[in-house]
Image (cartoon, rainbow, N blue to C red):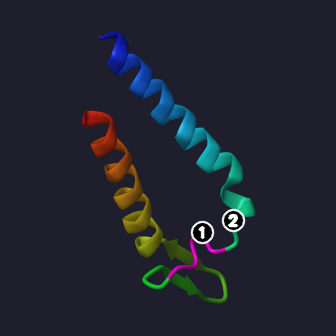
Amino acid sequence: MGRQLIILGLIIAAIGIVFSLGPRIPWLGKLPGDISIKREHFSFSFPLGTCILLSLLFSAVLWLFRR
C-alpha cells in the first residue's frame, strides 16, 4: 500500500509540473495531428497528437515502475 501511495504521489506531482510548465512549452498542443478550428465567433482545439505523445510517455513511466 505504501509503494502505491508513493507512485500515486509522483504521478500527481508530474501532472502538476506539466500543468505549470505547459504554457511555457511552445510545441505542446501544436504537434502534427492536433486539431484546431478557428472561426469568427468560435474556436475549437483538440490536441490529439499531444494526447497520444503524453499517453505513450506516461505508459512508459508506469511500465518502468512495474518492473
The image shows residue 31 at horizontal and vertical percentages of 52, 79
The image shows residue 67 at horizontal and vertical percentages of 24, 36
Q: Is residue 29 magenta?
A: yes
Numbered disc total: 2
Q: Is residue 59 above or below residue 12?
A: below
As drawn, the residue found furthest toward the right would be 24
Q: Is residue 9 above or below residue 34?
A: above
Query: Is 29 situated left or right of 65 in this image?
Result: right
The image shows residue 63 at horizontal and vertical percentages of 28, 44
As drawn, the residue found furthest toward the bottom would be 39
Which residue: 41% across, 72% down?
A: 48
Badge 2: few (under 14), some or many (20 or more) residues near its Cα, within 10 Å? Answer: few
The image shows residue 17 at horizontal and vertical percentages of 63, 43
Residue occupied by mark 2: 25
Pick the quarter of the image with the N terminus: top left
Badge 1: few (under 14), some or many (20 or more) residues near its Cα, within 10 Å? Answer: some
Q: Is residue 53 magenta?
A: no
* Secondary element at tag 1: loop
The front one of 36 and 61 is 61
* 1 and 2 marks in contact (CB < 8 Å): yes
The front one of 43 and 11 is 11
Spatial CA span between label 1 and label 2: 6 Å
The front one of 4 and 41 is 4
Query: Is 38 situated left or right of 58 in this image?
Result: right
Which residue: 62% across, 48% down?
A: 19
Q: Is residue 31 above or below residue 40?
A: above
Which residue: 41% across, 27% down?
A: 8
Which label number is shown at residue 28? 1
* Secondary element at tag 2: loop
Q: Amino acid at mark 2?
A: Ile
Q: Amino acid at mark 1?
A: Leu
The region drawn magenta spans 27-31
